[in-house]
Image (tube, helix red, strand yellow):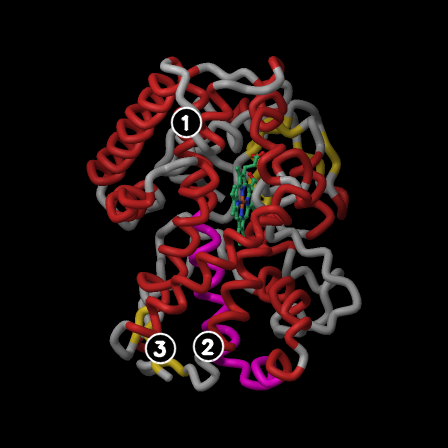
Amino acid sequence: MRLNSGREALLVARYQDVKLVLSDARFSRAAFAGTPLFARTAESLPLITTDAPEHSRRRGAVAHAFTARQVKRLRPMVEELVAEQIAAVAAGPRPADLVGGFTVPFTMRVMCRILGVPETEMSRFKPWVDPMMSIGRFPAEAVAAGHREMHDYFTDLVDGIQAALDEGRAVPGLIAEMLSPRKEERRLSRTEVITLSAGLFVAGYETTSNEMAAAVYELLRHPELLRRLRERPGDIEPVIEEVLRFLCGNGSGGVPHVATADVALSGGVVVPTGEVVVPIPDAANHDPDVFDEPRRLLPDRPDNPHVAFGFGPHYCLGAELARLEMRSGVSALFTAFPAMRLAVPEEDLSWRTDMFVRGLWELPVTW
Ligand code: HEM
């Protein structure tokens, strides 16, 4: 394939090969970072475009905030926000747009609470993040402006929190923790705190809001699954796992890597040193050698080792949080609005094409 930059690359689609590229240190992300990663600059992706030891040092500074144990502690906060957003939808007009009215504000508020970003500022972010996440949909100037605004906002925020900490005031949230780490090995530079805060904010709400809306859409298309969830609410776990496998949420395909040695893939293909490879997790999730009937949404698969959250050292930092948000959000929506249905014909839905994260711009429903 040819990347946007004009560089040739090998597309990796088989499940075993995708896992190999994602986890084998002979494939480097940093070696690729000299050329633009689609619309985004390497600096704006402080985790995704780096290798060990830089990657592990940065990741190690924030990983404690997203462990399974920590996410368990976040549960009451997440459930409180779900309830508030459900109440807002119920009090609002019908039809309701579940993207603008539920999945985006809910997931954004979760990230605001975790990081310590003021919720009162939330309406500012989406107009910046939408162009930032473009892979062709928005003009280059809009993409650059989105990056600039977001970077400037988080620079001011981080500096403001630093000033408050310097005055001895207590500030809640992960940004303050990054600025005054409990352990010295977690210390980051000011620039790293700025790019990581903005990066976590975007990674945390953009994927989850879109995947959640797509999950609701899929469930509306599969009434038998909705019936099953009503009878056995605990089945939300396998249902969400299968939705994650089934959906192809990654609009850009995958993250480019450069082979730093000759590496043999399955089927005898040898990737020569210096070759760019792009592993496609969505393709791996539909590999018929691993998933029977991959194009069907089948939550009863005996085993569902999907790679929707990636694999290896860059495995999604927020996977447990995303699972909690998706399970709580989707369950609560169908409990609150059992008669929910699409408010427009399917062909009128507007899909996010040419965007990093696929999904729906709006999900109009009524009940
Ligand atoms: C359903 C929602 C989500 C999906 C499908 C998803 C998917 C992914 C995938 C596939 C990767 C690996 C990309 C790669 O190989 O470079 C990733 C990485 C990442 N995700 Fe998520 N994610 C979701 C939610 C979240 C949330 C809620 C957070 C909040 C903290 C988050 C933070 C991150 C970060 C920081 C990385 C980079 C990890 C690294 O490079 O070490 N994600 N995500």
Total numbered labels placed on residues in the image: 3
Residue 117 included in the magenta stretch of the image: no
Q: Amino acid at mark 2?
A: Ala
Q: Considering only order in the chain, which callout, 2 or 3, is on the residue closer to the N terminus?
A: 2
Q: Residue at point 68% right, 60% down? A: 287
**Which image quarter has ligand 1?**
top right
Q: Cβ(mark 2) to ligand 1 < 8 Å?
A: no
Identify the element where label 2 is drawn: helix
Q: Residue at point 57% right, 63% down? A: 327
Identify the element where label 1 is drawn: helix
Contact (Cβ within 8 Å) of mark 2 with mark 1: no
Bounds of the magenta span?
Answer: 205-227
Residue 154 left/right relative to 77: left
Contact (Cβ within 8 Å) of mark 3 with mark 2: no
Q: Residue tagged by mark 2?
A: 336
Q: Residue tagged by mark 1?
A: 195
Q: Position of residue 217 (x, y in %)?
A: 45, 73
Q: Position of residue 121 (x, y in %)?
A: 27, 42
Q: Nearer the viewer, residue 76 or 51?
A: 76
Q: Residue at point 33% right, 29% down? A: 154
Q: Cβ(mark 1) to ligand 1 < 8 Å?
A: no
Label 3 – label 2 distance at C-alpha: 13 Å
Q: Position of residue 151 (x, y in %)?
A: 31, 29
Q: Is residue 193 above or below residue 21?
A: above
Q: Is residue 130 above or below residue 104?
A: above
Residue 145 left/right relative to 174: left
